Image (tube, rainbow, N blue to C red):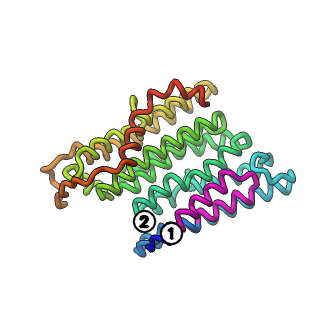
Amino acid sequence: MNPQAKLMFALSLLLGTTITITSNHWIMAWAGLEINTLSILPLIAKSHHPRAIEAATKYFMTQATASALVLFSSMTNAWHTGQWDITQMTHTTSCLILTSAIAMKLGMVPFHFWFPEVLQGSPIITGLILSTIMKLPPIALLYMTSHSLNPTLLTLMAIMSAALGGWMGLNQTQIRKILGFSSISHLGWMAIIIPFSPKLTMLNFYLYVLMTSAIFLTMNTVKVLKLSTLMTSWTKAPALNTMLLLTLLSLAGLPPLTGFLPKWLIIQELTKQNMAPTAIIISLLSLLGLFFYLRLAYCATITLPPHTTNHMKQWHTYKPTSTLIAISIVMSTMLLPISPMIPTIL
């Protein structure tokens, strides 16, 4: 793709995201979401492979439907209350439609089917953008309307997301699909706490973005897309693969790594809200995800040659690891000591 075109699409992405997260009016938020959708489509389809074209088509159709539902819910709310302000979402039916629309935008259960397929058909860096930046505007809308949304519906969708995200990721061999189901599972943790502590949802989202970015950038450096090639990547960058192991365990939420911090705080908050059974259920469902993170970690670092795969061994590269990967990996694994500061921020 032409560098100028790539720059234009990247700037459009930033513009769309900024418009949505800074707007107070529903029409402006909708316009930002549309700019985002239109600017990511060429980045998904840039390889001209049939799978990439299919991914772009699926993405467009899903996002267009979700945007239409956002517009419809805001118009229904304005019709009944006379308010176009995002924070004044008070009509019950409008809130239910909006919850469905944002769940479709994010890829939460039961609107999750498109996300792993689109991620699988996209290049790695586009997959990183889809998993991180593209989720910021819908999460921001969810944050601004959190006081109006139905907690029971959000809890139900969150538990289903955690269950299906873990369950469907178990038998995958493509790393991008595994990360797609991992994203669905993490969205469950974010959705379950948003009616009670929206700032905790944002903290969870920021840490998820940090850890996912580290994994995608590492994959891009060692050029692996599936488990069988991940087994041979140790010879290419041993130190990076070792750090990948820690980042994956952090994403799984194991102490004493960064990923344990949001899970710990969410379980604590749910217990305070007399929702201990819900906290137990979602904690047990996260063990499903732990299995495929351990599987990835095992393939990346513990399956050392010689082994039975037929893939050609990778050459050891002496190309220095980028500063961005180094910083994101360090932050993905070592932020747990900041947890005493969190109550002052929240």
- Inspect the magenta stretch and tell me whether residue 15 lies in it: yes
Residue 26 position within the rendered picture, expressed as x and y whole percent measured from the top left = 74, 56
Q: Quadrant of the N terminus?
A: bottom left
Q: Name the residue tied to disc 1.
A: 56
Image position of 340 (left or right of 300): right
Task: Provide the secondary structure element on which disc 2 rests.
Answer: helix
Q: Residue 242: image x %, image y %?
A: 27, 42
> Mark 2 and mark 1 in contact (Cβ < 8 Å)?
yes
Give the side of residue 251 with respect to residue 115, left or right.
Answer: left
Chief SS of the magenta region: helix
Residue at point 43%, 64% (across, down): 122
Of the 4 image quadrants, the one containing the C terminus is top right
Task: Reply yes or no: does residue 202 show up in magenta.
Answer: no
Determine the residue positioned at 50% across, 71% down: 42
Few, some or many residues within 10 Å of mark 1 (<14, 14–19, 20+): many
Question: In the figure, is residue 245 to the left or right of 150?
Answer: left
Q: Tell me where the magenta segment starts and ends, as one range.
A: 8-37
Q: Earlier in the sequence, mark 1 or mark 2?
A: 1
Q: Residue 304's mark?
A: none
Q: Please name the residue that numbered disc 2 is placed on.
A: 121
Q: CA distance from mark 1 to mark 2?
A: 8 Å
Q: In the picture provided, is 173 more to the left or to the right than 61? A: left
**Whether residue 55 is visible:** no
Amino acid type at circle 2 is: Gly
Q: Nearer the viewer, residue 340 or 62?
A: 340
* Residue 234 image point, x, y percent: 22, 49
